[in-house]
Amino acid sequence: MTYEAVIGLEVHVQIKTRSKMFTRVAAGYGQPENTLTDPTVLALPGALPVMNKAAVDAIIKAGLMLGCEIAPVCKWDRKNYFYPDSPKNYQISQYDQPICIGGTVEIELPGPARNIQGEHKGIPLTRIHLEEDVGKLNHGVGGSLIDYNRAGTPLMEIVSDPALRSADEAYAYLQSIRTSIVYAGISDCDMEKGQLRCDANISIRPVGDTKLGTKVELKNLNSIAFVRDGIAHEIARQIAVTKAGGVIVQETRDYDGIAGTSQSLRSKEMAHDYRYFPDPDLMPVKVDADWKARLAAELPERPFDKQRRFMAAEADGGYALPYTLASVLIPDRELSDWFEQAAKLAGAGRAQAVGNWIVNDLLRELAASATVLATAKVTPAALAELVGLVAAGTLLQHSAKEVFADMVATGEAPAAIVARKGLAAAPTDTAELETWCRDSIAANAKAVAEFKAGKESALNAFKGAIMKAAKGKANPKAVDETLRRLLAAL
Amino acid sequence: MTTPLHFQTVTELSAALAAGSLTSVALTEAFIARTHAVEARVQAFNSYDTDDALAQARASDARRAAGQALGPLDGIPVGMKDVIAVRDQPLTASSKILAGFVSPYDATVTTKLRAAGVVLWGRLNMDEFAMGSSTENSSTKVTANPYDLSRIPGGSSGGSAAALAAGEAPATLGSDTGGSIRQPAALCGVVGLKPTYGLISRYGLIAYASSLDQIGPFGRTVEDVALLLQAIAGHDERDSTSFKAVIPDYRAALTAPRTHPWRIGIPKEYFGDGLDPEVSAAVQGAIAYYKSLGAEIREVSLPHTPYALAAYYIIATAEASSNLARFDGVRYGHRSAEADNLHALYFKSRAEGFGSEVKRRIILGTYVLSSGYYDAYYGRAQKVRTLIREDFIKAYGEVDVILTPTAPTPAFKRGEKSDDPLAMYLADIYTIGVNLAGLPAISIPCGFTTAGLPIGLQLIGQPFAEADLLAAAYAYDATHDWAKRTPNL
Amino acid sequence: MQIDIDHLAMLSRLALTPEEKVKFSAQLGDIIGYIEKLKEVNVDGVEPTAHATPIFNVLQADDPRPGLSVEDALRNAPVQRDHMVVVPRVVE
Ligand SMILES: [Mg+2]
Ligand SMILES: [Zn+2]
């Protein structure tokens, strides 16, 4: 029997705000322990929550990015459970009236090869709701030490339908969410800093069945690679258990990404009963059309829309980029915007060259100099100019590389570098080039005959001597044109 | 014979301070002396800090000497129920679980009282976490009714009412979730106001039932209560449930000319079985007085009244079960000596820290919220709450205020109802509807029983119409001298 | 009215003595019997009231202000070490 997996993901994303979700003490990462608290964060007797508007704005934006319906009215509920990292022993969350409902995450599956685009599909979302993060437990010998700096940081939980079918799909889904959220400036989604966390609900069933199998919740998928590996591992485990005649028990398992193993988290407690009820300390939120429109106006283009546009023909307003380039540019909003600026300045027919420069050279140079794009000295205009010089034949590709390195290092304009270093393609005087071409033709009667007989490649036989005369800087396009003109006249 | 300082009204004391015939230090010393004299019998305070109070008093006198007095309350001592945070002072809610807790912050009302120049004076005993109607549920001490030391002062703000009645403070603050200001005010012969939900910030008030709790003032007269309300009312950005209401001049409103006679509603459901005949007679006397003033007395109906207590106990305990989860011995408060693992830390710290009534209500609240029961209890109670609120709104179509007894009986004997929680809960039947509907209501003295126990009447106003409510209460209070009666201690 | 006092005590994190369990069960039985009376009320089509005073959109600016010092934050902590609150080791 063959099995298929049914996977639903719960993704928690920390929202990038200056202050916390329900109080105005600063939110932050990497500060000394317990320096980001106030009576509300610590749940001191008498402290009350008040909602951070920026966090609500952020989740509405996330909802709009992912095509959710924004609820006209949503409310806040308490999820009651005891844990030392949760100061109130309840988490403020949203239960039956979340702020974002439905939605779709477009994913791109891996293609048959790295340079071939894979299939796209839409993964339906159940909801996105807003809640608050907990503190951090540091387990030591003498006990567990609690730092409440993270407690109360705004968090949104993105819940998918059980609609994913493989570890690859889950991976693609998470990538897509991450790209969209980062695009919209909602979070940096740094998994190492816990800004993006993922739990997976996984079950298997015989292919063809419509009934859902017993699900296992997999936790601690704390890197994007672990998400794929952990899910693949769990699917394999369930299939092996089932094939061996065993039964899958509903449980929570902890995935150890380093070891590639998982183990059951023995539920030290009883079945959960969270006793959700509306938080009497918080008032409902009504989101009207104006509010939504204001935020919609601030949203970036969706990443896959942008990818389609970049890959579209120039006649259709695109840049005719090959997938290999688009797939590198798109995940980085800043980089793809930079590309687009440069491509526009470079003009028709030159976008791919611009893309190549960015993907092959700019990224390498930035990495080598540990610089980020935002502070890079090279500008889109400068790259456009460089591409122009190469296209016009005034700069040879290998010289252009040298020019580009200088542009990145100093920010100097390409024309200035070319002039300063004398890197312009030679000659600039067409009479001299014609002389070199005539000399080469005269010395190669055999090649002349072959060319006349229709052998195109014979043209190359003339070029060595010309390049030698030009000390390597002959403009290949001019050489080509001149040779053809002279040969035609023979 | 002049009234001793400790039995004078805030209005009188304020005038003396303004006239320069009294200093805040002398006044504060008088209350300290009075407290030392009677506190052993009354047992109203959980803690007080005489050095801190006198330092505040000196600061007040210095302000006044510099011509910078802050208003009518500058230099007046005000006691606080031990459920309102005062920075650097103990805060216990009369619970062992908060024994030794020192607040690192001020409640918003505390900040406001400081801004009004008040001398913050002591933290007053109460039923643990405000759960009770007799102050017997305190883990610290049993407060006595100053009019009969063998009787309870009412609750949960029993210490606030008793300290005022006993002359240990000229005014106090309490909190009212189901009658916890009005019922002890009635039982101790003082005035107590529960403002409209949202008028006073709850920031820094230890929550019992968040959707019902309101802080409010106790005073000897309606006028004193108006002065205190003025100082603490108003929107607070730290409390999401705080309302952006326009705050009028409450004292001026007491004597403002009226365009029409009072229309007073008498809800028939509040005068049925269980109402003590002496209480009934006193309240009828007050109704007759209003009539003599030209008020129109109309019978009204609040048909869902029989369900208010049940709805209240579901909503209040549900919220409490969650609000009190934070008392876990982790970040503050009592931690069991046997907390050698996490399970014991929670279960034992809470078992040792909470008293019986608190445990009972936490368990009841947990039950009504638990899986499978939510709709039958909590969800239904919320809907009944809507119906109760609608009853009042409908009644206000024809009347300005509603008049009822505050409590069905005068103060009962200590221990009388301790073992019968349900009987104790019935002490609140006339007050809880107001909390469910979020309305303002005041209890004012309206007589004494033959045994010399105070009786209170309750006036219930429309949302945020405290000015009207106080004026209606003042019309009776200013012409009666119940407040001049003082207990023999 | 049958109530599972052990389950409720567990959810409430309260260690109850056997005597307390007996007493509370009986008292809660009475109270629950009393609150059952809500079932008499016809609540069809009635909206629930969560807040006595309906207000919407209480939101504050994302503008940090100072919180507590570490000393104040830990002032009441029963056990602390290295500027953190200590609890018995949490077994994951
Ligand atoms: Mg979840
Ligand atoms: Zn969550």
Image: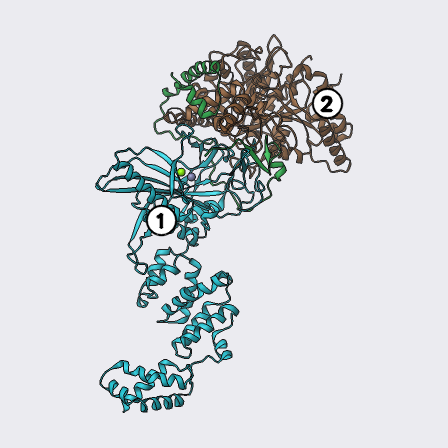
- Protein chain holding label 2: B
Residue A37 lies left or right of residue A186; in this view the side is right
Location of the C terminus of chain A by quadrant is bottom left
- Foreground: disc 2 or disc 1: 1
- Residue B386 is marked as none
- Residue A171 is marked as 1
Location of the N terminus of chain A by quadrant is top left
Q: Quadrant of residue A335?
A: bottom left
Q: Which chain is green?
A: C
Residue hosting label 2: B32
Some atom of ligand 2 lies within 8 Å of the CB belonging to the residue at label 2: no
Q: Nearer the viewer, residue B485 or B328?
A: B328
Shown colour of chain B: brown
Q: Nearer the viewer, residue B465 or B166?
A: B166
Q: Quadrant of residue B269?
A: top left
Q: Secondary structure at mark 2?
A: helix
CB under 8 Å between discs 2 and 1:
no
